[in-house]
Amino acid sequence: MGSRFWIATLLVVASYFPASPALSGVPVRLSTGSGVWSSDREDFETFLKDGRTSDRGIASLVRKSGWTADEVRAGFLRLYSVDVAGLARFLNSEPGVIFLKNQTRSYIPYASLSEHRVEALRSAILADAADGEISAAGILATLPTDFRLARLGGYDGVQNVCAELRCEGSEQCTSLLSWYMFLPACLEANAMATAVDEIDFSPLEPNRNRRPR
């Protein structure tokens, strides 16, 4: 029974995975009516590694995140264990598609805008989850196409943080980096069909009582 179960599980997961997508070179473009600022994957990797950045886009995102740079790095690098088959089933279900649409309120593919936003984010999540663990850094690194945080054409640059009761202040509850920090925990919860309130947000909790910047 054990071997048949795992074979069946692997077949379920494989059926949901896209065929090895090309990776995005620019996971964040800050788009406004007056222009675009691009921050590439290597810039994010450098920031997450040692906390330094010369990229104005990343510096602006951190400054407006509601968290310190060290908190952002810790949140991005934290690993969450996921049941890959359960996560794949959720993301391909009707509630999962609604979740993905809600999670791409203003953070959307650069070229196709909202047309393929669900497929693109789902692809990144499942690609990162292939080894049974996910993180914000991993999801960002496996985006299959360039993304933008849009403030134009009906997009307001606001992201819906999935654990709204766990964030504090408008920046923590609506910023792109804060959204990324909470996303893996919410995915872990949905993969297990667990209430978000039961998931451990401890790396973020100690600083929730300080006044948001």
Image: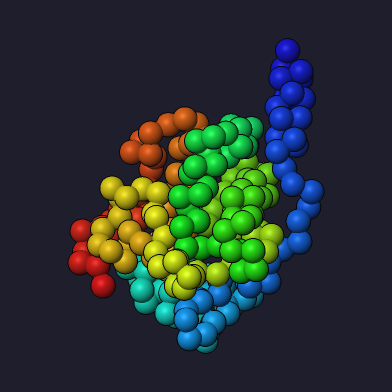
Q: Residue at x 45, y 37 (%)?
A: 189
Looking at the image, the residue that sits furthest to the front is 153
Q: Residue at x 66, y 59 (%)?
A: 142
Position in image of residue 174 (x %, y %) = 36, 62
Give the total of numbered labels.
0
Q: Quadrant of the N terminus?
A: top right
Position in image of residue 158 (x %, y %) = 39, 64
Name the side, left or right, on which 173 lies relative to 48.
left
Relative to 107, is 37 above or below? below
Q: Residue at x 76, y 20 (%)?
A: 3
Q: Is residue 81 visible?
A: no
Q: Quadrant of the C terminus?
A: bottom left
Looking at the image, the residue that sits furthest to the right is 19
Position in image of residue 19 (x %, y %) = 79, 48
Front residue (pair 184, 22): 22
Q: Is residue 17 visible?
A: yes
Q: Residue at x 52, y 47 (%)?
A: 100
Position in image of residue 116 (x %, y %) = 63, 55
Relative to 61, is 86 above or below? above
Looking at the image, the residue that sits furthest to the top is 1
Front residue (pair 168, 4): 168
Q: How is the image coloured?
A: rainbow
Name the side, left or right, on which 137 lies relative to 151.
right
Front residue (pair 203, 23): 23
Relative to 115, is 6 above or below? above
